[in-house]
Amino acid sequence: MNTLNRIWAVGLSTFKEAVKNRAFVGLMIGSLAMIVASVLLSELVVPDQQKRVVQNFGLSFISFAGVLIAITMGILLVYSEINKKTIYTIISKPINRWEFVVGKYIGMVLLLATVTTMLSICWFIVLKYREVSFRIEYIYSVVLVFSTLSLIGSVAIFFSSFSSPVLSGIFTFCIYIIGRQIPFIEQLLTARKGLFASMPSLKPVGNAVVSVFPDLTVFDLTKQILLEIEIPVSFVLQSSLYAFSYVFFFVAVSCVVFSRREFV
């Protein structure tokens, strides 16, 4: 069995295991219910705002629910192998540790693709019910949501390769929160008032954060959709490539860290 076959075998096994996980099933059911609930929520606003509610709430919740699933499953997929002691059987087989890590990530990408597809279909049905005209930007937004989830999933895999589930979850969620605040931090760095103006010694930290951490706001097209702004496909491709560069980094580092990890 060659490298690609081994990676795919791990990935497929990971995907099958994940979809049977009760945590995943619970999160999916809750996520689908919340998107459908946007129809009821839209009933509480004035009629001319109902379409905006299902657009905004649906897309935002697809992203947020997807992030929760990416963090939860990204942590559990590696930890479960260690907790069940099956990792000893795996590493004793003719498979490199980096192949195991990449396979786990591939399995999670398949899972996230399934999550994004199912939630998006539900969202499209809600939009159709509210008689919202279909726009290609909806597809673009879904593609960028998937890019976000793939990135966050790689971060979760990275931390779970050497840390405990609780700490991995905290670290990953912190990176997600910071990534959502990058534009705000950039504004503070150039503002005449505020944190960095009053404490100039912290500016190097702020500059390091905006330089190193991924800017997750580039994947959020909610504002453009609500304002009906056309989005060029080149922007979607560039943003996806931006996400892939971080994915490659985190998965590569995860492979190195996991290869050096001692199991006792």
Image: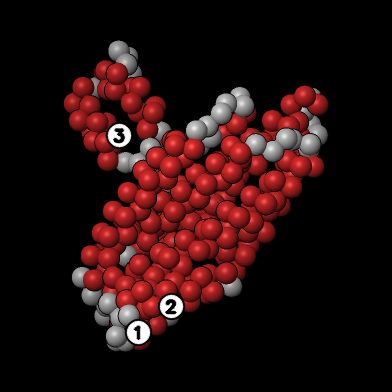
The residue wearing badge 2 is 9
Q: Nearer the viewer, residue 167 or 208?
A: 208
Of the numbered discs 1 and 2, the one sitting upstream in the chain is 1
Residue found at x 38% / y 56%: 154
Q: Could you tell whether 198 is left or right of 130 in the image?
A: left
Q: How many marks?
A: 3
Q: Which secondary structure, mark 3?
A: helix
Q: Identify whether 192 is placed above or below 123.
A: above
- Nearer to us of marks 3 and 1 is 1
Q: Determine whether label 3 and label 2 are within 8 Å by CB.
A: no
Name the secondary structure under disc 2. Answer: helix
**Where is mark 3, residue-wise?**
210
- Horizontal and vertical percent position of residue 62: 59, 47
Q: Distance of mark 3 from mark 2, alpha carbons?
A: 38 Å
Q: Reply above or below: 166 against 192.
A: below
| Residue occupying the point 24% across, 31% down | 207
| Label 3, label 1: how far apart the Cα atoms are | 43 Å
Residue 92: quarter of image: bottom left
Tag 1 near tag 2, CB within 8 Å: yes
Please provide percent x and percent y for residue 110: 50, 64
Q: Residue at x 41, y 33 (%)?
A: 181
Disc 1 versus disc 2: nearer the observer: 1
Q: Residues within 10 Å of mark 2 (few under 14, many from 20)?
A: some
* Residue 99 vertical position relative to residue 130 in the rendered view, above or below: below
Q: Secondary structure at mark 1?
A: loop
What's under tag 3, amino acid-wise? Val
Is residue 150 something one can see in this rendering?
Answer: yes
Residue picked out by circle 1? 1
Quarter of the image for the N terminus: give it.
bottom left
